[in-house]
Image: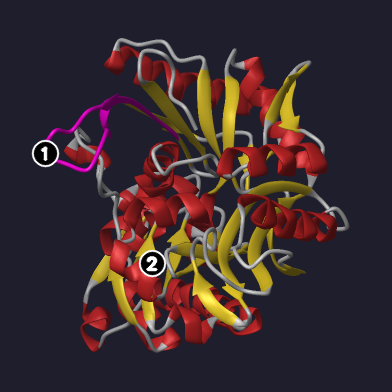
Amino acid sequence: MQPARNGIIAGLDIGSSQVSCFIARIESDRAGPGPRPRILGVGHHESRGVKSGAIVNMAEAERSIRAAVEMAERMARETVRKVIVNLSCGQPSSHMINAEITVPTPEVREQDVKKVLRQGQGQVIDLEGEIIHAIPIGYSLDGHKGISDPRGMFGDRLGAALHFVTAAAGPIRNLALCIERCHLEVAALVTSPYASGLACLLEDETELGVTCIDMGGGLTTISVFAGGNMMHLDFVPIGGIHVTNDIALGLSTSHTTAERVKALYGSATVTPSDEREMIDVPRLGEEDRETANHVSRSVLNGIIQPRIEETMELVRERLAASGLQEIAGRRVVLTGGASQLAGVRELTAEILNSQTRLGRPIRLRGLPDASQGPEYSTVAGLIGFAMSGPMETGDLTGITGSAIPAGRVARIGQWLRENF
């Protein structure tokens, strides 16, 4: 993806609990391998009208997006027209496709590579939904896998493994329409788990195999990386908001109080000392301290722990169903706002039987300290996506009122032209 003429790029993360916007300028780095983004402006606002990444109230979502973007523009002293947007709605799903052709000459030519990709294209047309990502995983020659670029090599049979990510068109149209109502244009759509992985994973991790788990407000996303590429993604419809709801119901208090109590005293693990520590929790609709619930910390954590366990057990099931547990190894990187809850890392390591670390945005210069937390991994990854080389997503056409993916064949054709 190309930045604007003035070198400005913008990422927009539309989450269930918060809308975030980063504005960056591409600057040359004489000491490094090439240009790098420097953050100029950061904006965020409480998310309204969004549920599990999907637009459910157009007017409220529009106001949240406008507020976040305007805040970032004021800080950056720049006006943006195009934004790279995260995608969590439309039930994005992964499809691995293998294609193989006979090479007519001893040496593999560029047209042979294009031909095997077109072979895969024919299978993609039969998939439901719109293509969001088309990622070449690797090539094989005469059964020998692990080839990154076969051009100029010798062989009789050329194969290609491709990872396509598709999503339902309707929710994408609603998302794009909402953004255009904010007088913004969608430059690219990037699935949230892909963006989170780009933001907080180390290069060695993506090569050796790793699972990135982003615990957001309304969703927990999963992305599996190996060989330097994203191999699989998935979504679990549980996030930090569900934990807050459980606390509000269990302790008969408001959502605001439940969120505060969770942040100050909550933990995903229960310890013997929790029984001795008491917490005052105001009852719903009452402000008198005398009528507050006096509960032990163990009661609070006894509400939190089952929900986190359920989330990680679902993640374990999704990974097992994908068949990629061996590829991903036993390395897990936790990120997202809900991952900051005490005890989540330890509980995740136990349930997934993995080496687990907390991830936060890396590789971005000029990022304020307050915006370096794991809740900003997705929006940071959108900026990183713009720097990662040829755009892997399909073309976006400026349609009346929205920007929806073009036809499958047209978009795959563009992807072929951009990558080869």
In the rendering, which numbered label is found on residue 259? none
Tell us which disc is closer to us: 2 or 1: 1
- Say if 34 sits above or below 216 in the image: above
The quarter holding residue 264 reads bottom left
Q: Position of residue 209 (x, y in %)?
A: 41, 75
User: Residue at coordinates 59% horizontally, 16% vertically from top-left?
Assistant: 182
Circle number at residue 31: 1
Q: Amino acid at mark 2?
A: Thr
Q: State which tag comes first along the sequence, 2 or 1.
A: 1
Quadrant where the C terminus sits is top right
Q: For label 1, count other residues whose C-alpha is less than 10 Å away and answer few (under 14), some (14-19) or many (20+).
A: few
Q: Which residues are magenta?
A: 20-41
The residue to which callout 2 is attached is 206
Is 225 in front, or is 16? 225
Name, please, the residue furthest toward the front.
Answer: 106
Q: Residues within 10 Å of mark 2 (few under 14, many from 20)?
A: many
Is residue 369 shown to the viewer in this render?
yes
